[in-house]
Amino acid sequence: MSTQDIPEENLPAEQGAAHTAAEVADDKNPFADPGLPPHEHRIQDIDEQAARRSERVVAMLFTVSMLATAGFIASYVTIPNDKSIYVFPLGHISAMNFALGLTLGVALFCIGAGAVHWARTLMSDAEVADERHPIEASPEVRAKVHADFKQGAKESAIGRRPLIRNTMLGALTLVPLSGLFLLRDLGPLPKETLRHTLWAKGKRLVNMNTNQPLRPEDVIVGSLTFAKPEGLEETDEDFQTEIGKAALMIVRLQPDNIKDKRELDWSYQGVVAYSKICTHVGCPISLYEQQTHHVLCPCHQSTFDLSDGARVIFGPAGHALPQLRIGVDSEGYLEALGDFEEPVGPAFWERG
């Protein structure tokens, strides 16, 4: 159906000057202005049934976006993060990542496709020529912008098409929930995991190098020995996670050189056990100066005095190294008498 077959009274009124009249070239203006071509009306402009079909298509796309967003949230909550599936031609991939990518992609695509279809079929497509104007807006221009905005809102038919308006608002409201749910996965909730380690009463101290339990006589004055809890093996799946909290450094001091009373009470014949994890950003401490009994973190040079409760004497570390209370079992091996009484490593929200 062409516009020539439609009675003039059924055609929509043009908003503003739809096209300008052609100008003829002359001496003052050697280039003729051809003006804008005659405006061709779309089928939706002249057939309300076609407009309603387009409205339903746009609403369907927005509805599919809402369903895809709900699918994104459901996938995130229900699919295990270690589950994999085979997808040709990608091969074996994470089921959660595939579901999240697919549902979020569909949600965003449908919003974009719905907006494009809405603009191309239902919003006004009349071309309007306008004069260029200075960057500074005059009161008249501002008034015109406000009027154009109101006119655009009227031409968008958002007031007359509540189905489109409501489904679009629903889709735009639900899509941000995808981002909010992703914030939850910045890392697993720590709960109590940062407050406790594998150390417990009766756990033997095992030499990290020899993998053998330690006796007090194995630790000589001036030496630095690294230890781990009995039962923790490098082949364990969670070894790195657990050793990052439970790693110990063991030093033997002359009891007369220990200045801190609690440190002396928690030691055994001058053998003291402190966390190896620096309280600044969690680097492993590995440098020991036997004359001063100082240990140094190689990352940012935080220095701790092991003869005085491992207090900070230099550097950015915020607090002393946690000490592990130790003793010996019936067979003469060094053992822990409990867990650390404070979280190891850098400070976090429970401090202060």
Image (tube, rainbow, N blue to C red):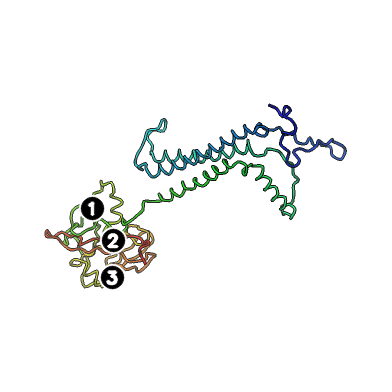
In the image, residue 189 above or below residue 88: below
Sequence-first disc among 1 and 2: 1
Labelled disc at residue 209: 1
Q: Taking 266 as reference, is 155 above or below it? A: above
Residue 331 to residue 23: above or below: below
Read off the residue under disc 2. 275
Mark nearest the camera among 1 and 2 is: 2
Instruction: Give the mark toward the camera: 1 or 3.
Output: 3
- Residue 87, by quadrant, is top left
13 vs 345, left or right, is right
Disc 2 element: strand
**Does the CB distance between marks 2 and 3 fall below 8 Å?**
no
Q: Secondary structure at mark 1?
A: loop
Q: Which residue is mark 3?
A: 308
> What amino acid is at disc 3?
Asp
Could you tell me if the residues under marks 1 and 2 are in contact, i.e. CB atoms within 8 Å? no
Q: Mark 1–mark 3 contact, CB under 8 Å?
A: no
At 60% from the left and 38% from the top, the residue drawn is 118
Q: Nearer the viewer, mark 2 or mark 3?
A: 2
Kindly identify the amino acid type of the residue bearing the numbered disc 1: Asn
Q: Earlier in the sequence, mark 1 or mark 3?
A: 1
